[in-house]
Amino acid sequence: MVFELLLLPLFVLGCTEPPSHNLQFSERRKLLGPPVTEPNWEGIRIKTYFEASSSSSFSSSLSKEYIPNALNYYNHAIKVVKVSTLTVSSTSCLNYTIPSELNKGITDGDVAILFKYNATGDDLAWAQICEVDPDLSMRPILGVIYIQGTWENKTWEQIYAQVVHQIAHILVFNAKLLPYFSEKQGEWLGISNVLGSYYRRSSEVSYIKTSSVINKAEIAFGCNNLYGMDLASITSDTASSIHWSKRLMFNDFMVPDSDVYYVVYSDISLALFQDSGWYQANYDYSDTIVWGYQAGCTFFTDSCVTDGAPNFSNFCNLTSGTSYCDATHTFKGMCNLGTYTDKIPAEYQYFSSPYMGGDDKYLDYCPVVMPNSDGSCRDLLSIPVDLNYKAYGEQSGDSSRCLEGTYVNKLSNFSINYHAGCHKITCQGSIATVHIGQEVIYCTPSGGLQTIRGYNGVIKCPPSDILCRNLPCINGCSGRGLCVDGSCNCDSGYSGNSCENRSETLMNALFFLMIFVII
């Protein structure tokens, strides 16, 4: 039997359609008989095969670092009913030959993924499912991930998130898999219990309405009667890859494009794995959202900006200051509000001028503060120590956060202007102590403007719970550890603030877990 399935790629530098493919049903039931009656849930084993069009430092990093790290993350975060032997029926997929050992059967994998890398062309990536197994309630067992370009302008965090993202498209984030979500083996929920839709400003919006997704989203957004989680608009009737709305889930790893930073591996995304019935999610390896956290139900229903004024602190409308704080209060940046040469679509016009809006269409043209390249408050190298410390009392580090104001040291020759600054934060109870040079102020749950001894101007305190809440770990602990209260507990053999360091022995062992071929 065959089942036609088309996938939409991850948007990187625009929409790039992957080749279509007739999805195969595995014939495993004929070969092995029925599955075991007592499920044996264990960390998912993803068997990978890597092919590169040429040898390069980036292809080496993909095979030796990014992919193994992503596999390690999934092995911790997702459990699956272990199969004694994984056998696929396909001999080719998208003109790629399936390794013969998969047709004979392997004992060290629950799903097989062929990674294909081509160094030439624009940076892009897509994922395609090749085969599912009816004996496993239509669980995917074979797929292809294609990565192209040098990715030299992307950060380590963005590339790693990209690999984790593409694997998710093979495992669960696919519209054609939604009808086969089940509570029990063979008992499908039905598409009407998984996917819903409504109309917003003349456009149809699809949303996920499964129980775990709704539960995690209600807790995160502070909305007790949430209908579901909106999906990004699908640009083709044949497209099947699904992503969260970036307007709601800005820096989650499953938004449509790679133009994100401080990537969050949210419990909402892992909840979709849980709701499929194929997987069990280990939420210890997920984060609570930062973007939209406790913003309430109106964050879903209200416009980001009305008559030029932001309705939520996540959005902006000012460009006159020298810098602003992003929504996480961990970066200094600028509001991406600008003017287009053509009119913005009518449903996304928030200002008196139909040409004005944010520069990201995946954010529904909502303007947001995007970080400067040297704007991280947690990066010790981001602050010009002498200049900014003397003028604004700034200090970067893991406990530093971003605040705004017109404050400037009275002894400085800097003029008073609106700006953002990075400052060390210490918290006790509901009070956040903000260190500005040698002085301190105390931010309360209600926030507000304060003056600083020895400084002209004022500083704007956000609510103290924003400054004091635990944040996701940097780089998601690189897929090599567990984030606890904002700090990484690294796996054995790894160390560093983001588990970025590893022993040579472990490095060599990880390499030999992969099959590396230069074609």
Image (cartoon, rainbow, N blue to C red):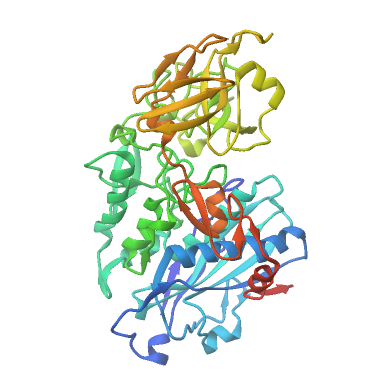
Residue at image position (41%, 23%) is 443
Q: In this view, does 464 lie above or below 111?
A: above
Q: Quadrant of the C terminus?
A: bottom right
Q: Residue at x 49, y 39 (%)?
A: 362
Residue 166 visible to an observer of this rendering: yes
514 or 235, nearer to the observer: 514
Q: Which of 180 and 22 is in front in this view?
A: 180
The answer to whether 291 is drawn above or below residue 421 in the figure is below
Considering depth in this image, is 399 or 164 the residue closer to the camera?
A: 399
Give residue 485's position: percent from left, percent from top: 44, 47
Q: Which residue does the image show at 42% across and 24% down from the upper left?
A: 462
Q: Judge left or right: residue 143 versus residue 223.
A: right
Q: Decide which of 517, 71 is in the foreground and name it.
A: 71
Q: In which quarter of the image is residue 63?
A: bottom right
Q: Is residue 247 above or below residue 432?
A: below
Quadrant where the N terminus lies? bottom left
x and y, in percent, of residue 133 in the image? 40, 78
Q: In this orientation, does residue 17 appear?
A: no
In the rendered image, residue 338, in percent from the top left (x then y), is placed at 56, 23
Question: Who's the residue at 57% across and 14% down the image?
Answer: 320
Where does residue 357 sit, x and y in percent of width and height?
50, 25
